[in-house]
Amino acid sequence: MLGWRGRIGLLVPATNTVAEREFWKLIPEGLTVSTARVVSIVAEDEVERLAAYKTQVIKAAQEVTHVNPDIIAWTCTSGSFITGAGYDIELAREVTQLVGAPAVTTSTAVLEAIRQLGISRLAMGTPYRDSVTEIERRFLEESIDGLKVVNTVNLSVLGPSKRGLILPERVYQLGREVDTPDAEAVFLSCTDVRTIEVLDCLEADLGKPVFSSNQATLWAVLQRLGVSTRSLPGLLCKSP
């Protein structure tokens, strides 16, 4: 039986071309990934567009339940932090109550990754514009007592459909640009950015943990399924 070890219901923004690929590339044997795409409203204001995802996330979660998933993941970083601290938990709770399967969001997974690493000073690179990057910084700091985002660098890639075109080489450069001596770890945000190819080499070159949205989401999903994370890239997944 396919999915004998666990079935993952993946919810991704309709324009996302990276998350599915990275999940399928990294999932251990015996797991399956079934995807439903989440369509957002058309809006010039990016914050308004991201906040409007909620209704469509619920709809997509209902669609993916046809494969009887063991867990559902809303794999969108900005779409799960955009209205502030606690929004990620509220959204996951609503999905779980509606479809009867446990749910996790990328923002929740990122917070859990930070706590797992035991860090209080974080550098963050994003593809977003200034306004969304600032909302993410506040979300992280308000969600974890004592956490300080010591530096941010954003690429200001306008239009979500263009983020999947950012080459891993540029993501590697972003990781080096945003790092500072006082940062204990580097976080690369957005599930529509290719990060998996560069996490290990960034960690080796920077000498500190480097984690990304897709890596953290899959790590959190595997933890909830009781499946080992040690085959995933990055120091995060090798922690005891």
Image (tube, rainbow, N blue to C red):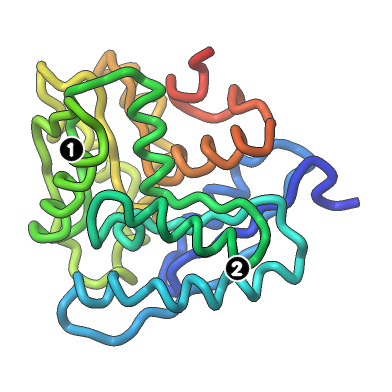
- Position of residue 164 relative to residue 178, above or below, is below
Secondary structure at badge 1 equals helix
Q: How many marks?
A: 2
Residue that sits furthest to the front in the current view:
97
Name the residue located 55 percent from the left edge and 57 percent from the top edge: 20
Give the vertical position of 138 relative to 165 (above or below).
above
Q: Residue 78's spot in the image, x, y percent?
A: 29, 58
Q: Are marks 1 and 2 in contact (CB under 8 Å)?
A: no
Q: Identify the residue under disc 2.
A: 98
Where residue 169 sits, quadrant-wise, is top left
Which residue is found at the position 59% from the left and 22% from the top?
230
Q: Residue at the location (32% across, 51% down)?
A: 86
> Residue 42, how many percent across, how many down?
29, 87
Kindly identify the residue that appears in the image at 51 percent across and 72 percent down: 58
What's the amino acid at mark 1? Glu
State which mark lies toward you, 1 or 2: 2
Quarter assignment of residue 83:
bottom left
**Picture quarter containing residue 204?**
top left
Q: Residues within 10 Å of mark 2 (few under 14, many from 20)?
A: few
| Residue topped by disc 1 | 141
Q: Position of residue 124 (x, y in %)?
A: 20, 38
Q: In screen coordinates, is 128 left or right of 70?
A: left
Q: Residue furthest right?
A: 1
Is 160 above or below relative to 197? below
Q: Is residue 136 left or right of residue 17?
A: left
Q: Secondary structure at mark 2?
A: helix
Report, in whole angstroms, how far the alpha carbon at label 1 lies from the one at label 2: 30 Å
Type of amino acid under label 2: Leu
Tell me where residue 123 appears, x and y as whole percent: 17, 32
Question: In this orientation, which residue lies closer to the viewer: 71 or 130?
Answer: 71
Q: In the image as oriented, which residue stretches furthest toward the bottom?
A: 42
